[in-house]
Image: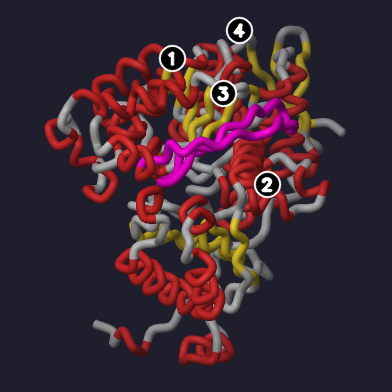
Amino acid sequence: MANLSSLTHPRQSDASLTALEGEGPEPALDRIKGATPVAVIDIGSNSVRLVVYEQLSRAPTQLFNEKALCGLGRGVSASGRLADESVEMALKSIRRFAALNRQMGVGRVDVLATAAVRDAENGAEFIEEVERLTGAETTVLTGREEARLSALGIISGIRNADGICGDLGGGSLELVEVSGTEMGSGETFPLGGLSLEDASDGDRGKAEKIASKALGNSKVLSRGKRRPFYAIGGTWRSLARLHMQQTGYPLRVMHHYAIEAQEALEFCRMIAKHDVESLDSIEAISKSRRQLLPMGAVVLAEIIETMKPSRIVMSALGLREGHLFDLLDIGKRAEDPLLVAAEEFSILRSRSPRHSFELAEWTDGVFSALKIDEAAEEVRLRKAACMLADIGWRAHPEYRGLQSLNMIANAGLIGIDHPGRAFLALTVYYRHEGIGSESTSPRLRELASPRLIERARLLGGTIRVAHMISAAMPGVIQQTRVEMREEQLTLVLPPDLGPLAGDRVMRRLRALAKLSGHDAAIAIEH
């Protein structure tokens, strides 16, 4: 057996080995070339969190994420001060975060502080020490600024959002209306989990009355009837995770997880009435998060009662990602985050990223020949699927379909809902396993409409034909075309590519044509 100390990564240079010995961080080979990490330290009323992103991008990818539940907001409403024990825990965590940032070669560190720090008498003293440890200026956000950044998080991560977003922290709740890329003015309420627990002395009945009275005066919620409510915050994510577990939901992706309003209301009422530790599947929630679940459920239930939304949509993006989106120039903001992320996947994992782009263009012609009518959303999903089509090629051939499906279904994609995820995952699954395969999860197929499943088969079949011609190499398929000739789906190859017209290509072309009720043919001509 080889001595592990003698092994090096393929293609490692002397320079990279020197970096491993301590002269600087070495980026992994599956990182975006030239990307400079950006870090956000978020000092909240319940948690203090470090998130390091690969780069400032329209589709930010997390390199590192760590939180410490320090409870800075606990008792602030009564004492007016951050508790010494909480401050000590927070500063210890921030000292570690600063060391991690140096270790990861972070180029920019932004420190944001929210309700607990801005409300506490000793907040300025605490911030002074934070700035000494991080070497970065700390921005203490007002309630309205929190609401604005949370709204930007929704705008950046949910395509064509149109409703009310709410960010529940430990100290406060921020509400703001969003519509497309526009947002209204924000409101802030002292209804964070820790604040509400303190104000109600832990009495859930009293907490309901406090929340009901405060939210009854919300002008923002009054504009949300029959529109989605976008929920942000760790406590609400924990509620949604518990709901996923109890219902056997096929994905564990929090972003864009949607629950119908009435179902969410009944679930929240149940959580608020029972002992947390007795709840079914409570082991899915970390013990540190369980304590505030009832308060989060109380607030969400009162929001539903007051607003009368159509559904609750969870967002994994909030204040931090809204802050990053705020830093982008207008051109970058206008980019499609799904296509940006799919392109990065292709660059990092495909045999040829250029082939992925060619494939996206080539399928335009195939769908045109088949007279497939596509909405704008379906076009962008098709192009994203083409860029993801080859990311599982390094897996064993028998597992490429399943591995690709799992990778895509659970990827950190934004700008896409769960039916769209199912479409992308199924398309690439069919591309590997064949368009007649039904061995994948029936629950995953339930997430997609019959129309999307049909389109996934068509696109998967189209990609199967393309890859049999090109072997995933660039510069090939754009020399070919697909046409409909006398009810025959015809693949046209130039003479120099004529030898590619084998039996396997014909079988795949016939399978694709059969989906639309046509015969198939191959023609060799200029």
Q: Quadrant of the N terminus?
A: bottom left
Q: Do the residues labelled 3 and 4 touch (CB within 8 Å)?
A: no
Q: Are marks 3 and 1 in contact (CB under 8 Å)?
A: no
Task: Please state which amino acid type lies under the numbered disc 2.
Answer: Val
Residue 336 image position (x, y, % from top left): 71, 39
Q: Name the residue under label 2.
A: 340
Chain part drawn in magenta: 167-193
Q: Name the residue under label 4.
A: 517
Q: What element carries label 1?
A: helix
Looking at the rendered image, the disc whose residue lies closer to the viewer, 3 or 1, is 3
Look at the image and tell me whether residue 154 can be seen: yes
**Mark 3 nearby-residue class (10 Å; few <14, some 14–19, many ≥20):** some
Q: Is residue 160 above or below residue 263?
A: below
Tell me which residue sits at (57%, 21%) in the image. Answer: 221
Tell me which residue sits at (60%, 26%) in the image. Answer: 459
Q: What element carries label 2?
A: helix
Tell me which residue sits at (76%, 35%) in the image. Answer: 361
Q: Residue furthest right?
A: 526
Compute the Cα span from label 3 to label 1. Answer: 12 Å
Q: In this view, does 4 lie above or below 436?
A: below
Looking at the rendered image, the disc whose residue lies closer to the viewer, 3 or 2, is 3
**Mark 4 nearby-residue class (10 Å; few <14, some 14–19, many ≥20):** few
Look at the image and tell me whether residue 385 can be seen: no
Task: Please state which amino acid type lies under the numbered disc 3.
Answer: Ser
